[in-house]
Amino acid sequence: MTTRLGLGLPQMRQYDLGRDVPDVARAAEEIGYDSLWVFERALVPEPATQGLYGIPGAPWPDYYRGVADPLVTLTLAATATSRAELGSSVLVAPLHLPFQLAKSLATLDAVSGGRVIAGFGTGWSLDEYAASGVLPFEERGTALDEVIAVCRAVWGPDPVVHHGKTTDIASAVVGPKPVRPIPVLLAATNRRAMRRLVERADGWLPGAYGPEQLAAQWRDLRELAEEAGRTEPVRTVIRVNARVAAKPNTAADRPLFEGDTDQIAADVAAHTGIVPDAEILLDVQSEARDAAELKDTAAELYEKARAAGV
């Protein structure tokens, strides 16, 4: 069975968003990509008060400056496409007011004809939490639970009723409704997050950091699903952040997903078959100079991945 492939949409500051997002989305659909994806980076603190991913001293990459809003980006892509699914990997859900986020996603699903995938995570940036003004960082798990619960309620039948920590809906008609139940996927790396996934979500958004690590995380997730008595499948979309170069990376210690398209396609192939029916999201926007180069890279990598058996 052919692996479904997705492409990260252009959100970084080298792109002309109003022109390039629809252009790249159309091209990706024509190439054969099955889905289009966004991520969220609300701000970059300057000077940095916290290292990247919360790692002390780790620098923030320059390409995080000026990342476009994920929902606006998906809306631009929705207007330019008809087939590809529209996903977030990930939307930092606790940065958003739950009711407004639920309604925005429902509207986008209605507009796109039922193509939205809601990929959520808790994030790690203290500065983003402080700027959002919703709940403090220490309550990120509670905030994510609230978002999921509100989304399920708002997307469900009327009258909508929800009584939670930050959202109180006594009884209301809320529309538009999604075309179909929007799948909720979660980024989860530890057992606590995986337990939330098993109990509350439809799928999983792991990062591609090596076949062995992916296999170990998948074993943990399966164990937790069995313990919880979950029998329905866990939809999995593996995120690949690739740094594509024109020439092969000949370093003996070449990092995964750094090199030419042949090397990256081989790395992608090594991550397939570990999780049954897993999809692969290829984000190659950071090294492209403009949309034309991004489209060329996306087309070449798609061809090379298929040739590698993906």
Image (tube, rainbow, N blue to C red):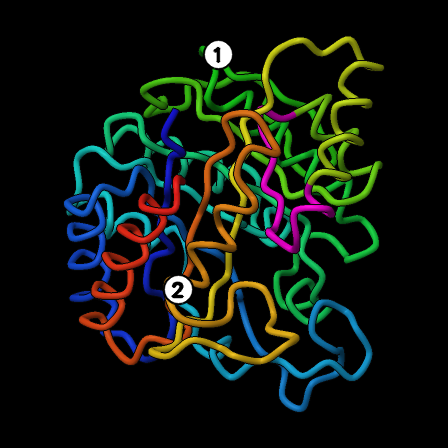
- The reply to whether the magenta stretch includes residue 99 is no
Q: Residue at x 76, y 19 (%)?
A: 225
Judging from the image, what secondary structure is the residue with disc 2 in?
loop
Q: From which residue to which does the magenta span run?
A: 201-214
Residue 117 in the image, given as x and y percentages of width and height: 43, 34
Q: Is residue 151 left or right of residue 247?
A: right
Tell me which residue sits at (27%, 74%) in the image: 15
According to the image, label 1 marks what residue?
159
Identify which residue, 94 or 252, lies in the foreground. Answer: 252
How crowded pointer 2 is (Cα within 10 Å; few <14, some 14-19, many 20+) is rated as many
- At a point 23% along the width and 43% down the height, the residue shown is 78
Q: Quadrant of the C terminus?
A: top left
**Nearer to me, 21 or 29:** 29
Rendered view: 249 above or below 101: below
Query: Type of residue at label 1?
Result: Pro
Kind of residue sitting beneath label 2 = Val
Residue drawn where x is 31% and y is 80% of the image? 14
Task: Give coordinates of residue 168: x percent, y percent.
Answer: 64, 29
Q: Position of residue 160 (x, y in %)?
A: 52, 17
Quarter location, residue 104: top left
Residue that carries the numbered disc 2 in the rendered image: 284
